[in-house]
């Protein structure tokens, strides 16, 4: 079996969304032709490689056409229905679970984002209920974090770095400090890490 592997940066979150409903909303946005540039770039890179392995030429162009024509979104609806889900949420993402509370993480100073630590953000999201650390724990599909500032972005003091959606205020209080420490603001400009570090082979 022919295989291609990509080593990609995991210093900061991919895209802008963390959490179940959040990431589905973002996926729908990408399939509608929107979404964050880094996520789109990586999806196109992977899709092109997969089609190339399957002997399909012009893979990237075919994927872009599938998105622009709406065929990719329609196929997603088919997949959701085939798995027993409700494809209506694709036309109306507001039907996805909604958390009862939200808070923001603000920049403590002005400057440039030098660090947006994916691990700290991921751990905080998990402990807010978006994931599980043990198999017997429940997952709250409404819990999520939207990242507004990533490495290289310029921010002013008080700007929103992230919006946090949660249901249990006590869990938020326990994760507030961890999440706030995920960003480091520098006076000097910072360069985002390369998205794809290496392709093998």
Image (cartoon, helix red, strand yellow):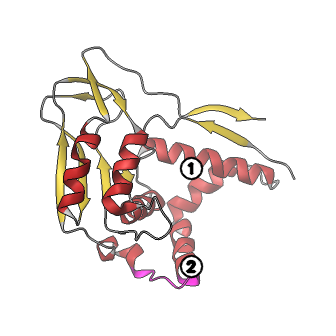
In the rendered image, is residue 16 in sight? no
Pointer 2: what residue? 78
Left of 54 or right of it: where is 108? left
Pick the front one: 150 or 142: 142
Q: CA distance from mark 2 to mark 1?
A: 20 Å
| Earlier sequence position, callout 2 versus callout 1 | 1
Residue occupying the far bottom of the picture: 84
158 w.r.t. 132: above or below: above
Judge whether residue 85 is colored magenta.
Answer: yes
| Residue name at image x 48 percent, y 61 percent | 31
Q: Which mark is residue 128?
A: none
Residue 8 on image: x %, y %: 58, 37
| Residue name at image x 51 percent, y 38 percent | 10
Q: Magenta region: which residues?
A: 81-88
Q: Which mark is residue 43?
A: 1
Residue 16 on image: x %, y %: 37, 48
């Amino acid at each position: 079996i022919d295989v291609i592997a990509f080593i990609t940066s995991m210093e900061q979150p991919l895209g802008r969304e963390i959490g179940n409903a959040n990431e589905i909303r973002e996926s729908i946005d990408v399939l509608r032709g929107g979404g964050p540039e880094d996520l789109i770039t990586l999806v196109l890179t992977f899709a092109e490689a997969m089609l190339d392995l399957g002997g399909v030429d012009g893979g990237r162009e075919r994927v872009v056409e599938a998105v622009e024509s709406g065929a990719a979104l329609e196929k997603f609806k088919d997949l959701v229905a085939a798995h027993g889900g409700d494809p209506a949420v694709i036309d109306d993402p507001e039907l996805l679970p909604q958390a009862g509370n939200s808070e923001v993480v603000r920049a403590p100073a002005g400057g440039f984002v030098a660090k947006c630590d994916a691990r700290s953000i991921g751990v905080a999201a998990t402990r807010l209920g978006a994931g599980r650390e043990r198999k017997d724990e429940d997952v709250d599909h409404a819990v999520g974090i939207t990242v507004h500032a990533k490495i290289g972005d310029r921010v002013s003091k008080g700007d929103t770095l992230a919006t946090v959606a949660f249901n249990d205020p006590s869990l938020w209080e326990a994760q507030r400090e961890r999440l706030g420490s995920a960003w480091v603001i520098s006076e000097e400009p910072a360069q985002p890490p390369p998205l794809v570090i290496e392709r093998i082979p």
